[in-house]
Image: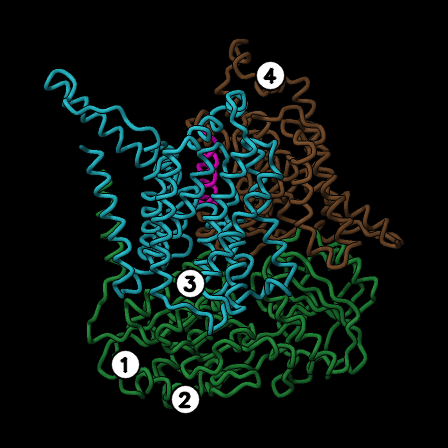
Chain colours: A green, B cyan, C brown
Amino acid sequence: MYGRLAILAAAGFVQGTLIAHAQDTIKIGVALELSGRFVSFGSYCKDGVEFASELYGNTTVAGKRVEFIYRDLQSDAQTTVTAFTELLSTQGINYVIGPTASPIAAAAIGPWRQTKPIWLVPGASTTTMETEVGAEPTFFHTYPYAYHYHETLSAALRHYLGEGKRVAVVYVDDAYGRTHLPLVKEYFTKAGFEIVAEEVMRANSPDLNPVLSKIRSARPDILIGLVQSTDAVTLAKQVHTRNMKIPYLVGAASTQHREWQDAVGEAQEGWIGLGTYLPHLVNWPANPEYPKIFMSTSEWERLFEARFKREPNYDDIMCYTNAGQLLIALEKAGGDNKDKVAEELAKLDTMSPFGPTKFTKTRGGTRNQAFSSMLVFQRHQNKNILLYPLSVAKDATLYQAPR
Amino acid sequence: MATQLIRGGSILLALAFVGLTLISYPSINDLAFRVAMLIIVATSWNIMANAGLVSLGHSAFWGVGAYVGLLTANTGMPLGVSITFGFLAGGLLGILLAIATARLRGFFFAICTLGLSEGLRVVALMLPNITGGAVGLFLAQEARPPLKLIFLLGSIGAILAVAIAIVLSRLPFHYACRAMRNQERAAQMLGVDPRIYRARVMALAGALAGAAGSLNAMYGGYIDPSIAFTLRVTIESQIAPILGGLYTIAGPVLGSGVIVLLAEWTRLAFGANEGLSQLIFGGILVFAILFMPLGIVGVWTKARARRRRDSSMVRGGDPPDAKPRRAGA
Amino acid sequence: MSFLPQAIVDALLLGGIYTLMVIGLSVSLGITRVINFVHGEAIMLGAYAAYWGLTLLKIDPLLALPIVALLGAVIGFLVFKGLIAPVLDAPQENQILLTFGLGLVLQNIALILWTGNERSSNPPYAFSSFDFDTVSIPGGRLIAVCAAIIMVVALFIWLKYGEWGRASRALAENRDAAILMGINVPFLYAFTFGLASALAAATGVICSFIFAITPFMGFDMLVKGFAIIILGGLGSIVGSVAGAFLLAFAETTVAYYVPSGNGWAEAVAFVVMFITLIIRPRGIVGQVTGQ
């Protein structure tokens, strides 16, 4: 009986890991968190890549078909190691997009080093990525690092509020909060703000009242919440309920998420956030050289909404663009030559719906960083109002939170 | 005769397992390694369960081993030392747990282990200066051992763990544990001091799981509190023995193989759909508990008994080489 | 300290929430003695039911509560009869794994159906609060405490005076004697489990407007629930309530007065649990030690 079981298992396993050494396919690995706690980031990214592969259609790149191989990392470190090992060593894949979450990307570093494929990471704002693999020529980071966040944020707030304002920080005790806290302190102090309180909270904490009481007693002007997903919802709701009398509430990256906005309802009014992309607010022009894949932003949004029946977010467009960049680099390199593709990708300086695709060095040591500029905005009457950079924010006013 | 066949076959299988590490096929090596790690923790869990101690927090030992191992390696110590330290750390935790829970049994003991695992995770989070906290801990580049060595150690470790289990099953130790499992007070009356046996059992089980944890940390190269004290280890270290056959020796081994292959298969076949792979995993778990309570070994034993019965009914009388079954096999 | 009045209020309100989390678990653990790992998912499903009720049908969560609870009872009853009753006499590990596997299945069904995005229901009272000089009392949590009180009192009365309530107590004390007394034990087991599920579902409804809900919310609640039950004592409703409030006070005190207190608050639950198990395994009010 378990002889049959063994055969079944072996068959399934072999089916999954057959080396399709078909010489006429270029395979691109897409390793994302499609289940587990990071599923919301991973699944949007997958939509973006899928969209790109659909639009690119059955055309070939340099005479070969392109195939995207999706793998679910299950938001788990061990699975990530196994998946990367399978993609890189068994399937011999030279190009990987993903993952998006910092701890999962960190877990992938080990197996990545086995063959060092071209690695586009549309996420992972933690600076440990930079320290570990930033200098590698095949590592391409397409999302801001934590210090980009606060560089922009502190500059924006300083522009509107001037110097000397009091800042309180709430942060979750996880990689996100712990990474961002020292950077908040560094950049905001440099910009002339005074940090009057910093409170840690446990992830999935049911009661934030003690934290809020302590913050309230410090009487800050600005509250910065270094929180994500459920904690961001709980924080916003409790802050709103509590009548904190803090005029400016900053949610960093969580404010832009549709889910957060829907979940907190009226409590979102006045929250300030930042992100790399906001739907229907910035319109990059179409790319005359690659019109099929890099159309104008508004055109892309139109097509996306028709296909997926929902508003796009930054994961969608970022991963779409990354896939597009990779395909263009493949074409320019003339085929499945990893080093040439890396060269072409690093050189690629063209327009995309997400913005200019140019890769530059960061101060932290990453060789290939793109898309590090961020937009600061505020939620007002259920809409996003752009605040910063000033070139796109036309005469914006900064509102105070209602309570 | 069948028993000799099993024994011969097992030795061959063990050799093949070690042999796998010599082939350079990273996907298979990775899978074999995962199976090896699971065999170690599953056997470790089984040893504890055999003494009536159900552990709901086996990841506590695993995580402690992972941190101690990684931290030791980062100070420049060779691989063997790091693993040994992980082994000792796990064992120490086991002894501490035994002392703390000396009077607890059954459900209370189980919940205590769950609390231990979760509590340690919080401790790891709140002490970033030692453990790297939420940001995590990387294995220093220079300290990275060659992959082949890790795989080899993994396979050997698994075989050692099973060997230990076999040796234990022949010693009086084993009978003391079984007596404890059935009725601890009665065992006490027979002269078995439960506290000493508990300490020994938990030290051994903890040490094995700790060693596995540190080896795994060397392989992955990165841990953080949720990765080190992951629920996954707790779950899998239980599912494997139960699926394979509780309290048996082959059970954890069989179960580990099935679990890892099953997880891989569902992930590859259904992985592109969010949540579907984990859903199937849970469903299979439910199915196995309901319809295969004695595990795979149980099913096989029943089938064998049925075959013997059928053959004896046909021939009329006992089959010539019917032997009484050995306890613990 | 100037925080004291607010700290007391927060602790009381948190105690109410914890009581809700624990009351269903206490019933199922205390009477059916099944190690129930599905409880967290039952709460989760109740929360989603309330959320969808508000979003799609515009029904206020509190109005939907009785319906959701009833639904929870029926489903719990059926699940018990179908899946859990067979392992009632099996080793405990089997019960644990079965209910755990079931929890995993439910979690992922919820994930596939409703995605992992966090949600929250926002009826108007979710944001209300009563503000005085030194204290602020959030309205949503106050409702939670009231609901907890109502549920506990109702449960108590039922156990003490209701026909089946008394039968359940008999069952918890001595199963064989209960059978001899002519009590329909299999039915009663399933019924009690259904009751526990109803309580869990009701808890979920209330949680839906207090904090965020995701398919994964069940497990943390479950672990904390176990810790509280141990603290209060297995098999005692009073104990569980006492345990809930005690833990709430301990956690709130740590959160307010220990630096980085909120970070350590979770560890408090486990420390408390450990201490209880070592010093007094029966718990505060516990009647039976179980094994």
Q: Identify residue type, mark 3.
A: Tyr
Q: Which residue is mark 3?
A: B219
| Residue C197 position within the rendered picture, expressed as x and y whole percent measured from the top left | 55, 34
Verify CB contact (< 8 Å) between mark 2 and mark 3. no
Say which element carries label 4. Answer: helix
Q: Quadrant of residue C236?
A: top right
Label 2 marks which chain's residue? A
Between A310 and A374, the residue placed more toward the observer is A374
| Cβ atoms under marks 1 and 4 closer than 8 Å | no
Q: Earlier in the sequence, mark 2 or mark 1?
A: 1
Q: Is the residue at mark 3 from the same chain as the one at mark 4?
A: no
Q: Position of residue C150 (x, y in %)?
A: 71, 32
Q: What's drawn in magenta, residue-wise? A: C91-107
Instruction: Calculate the distance from the C-alpha at mark 2 to the C-alpha at mark 3.
Output: 36 Å
The image shows residue C173, relative to residue A223, as above or below, that is above
Q: Chain of mark 4?
A: C
Residue bearing mark 1? A336
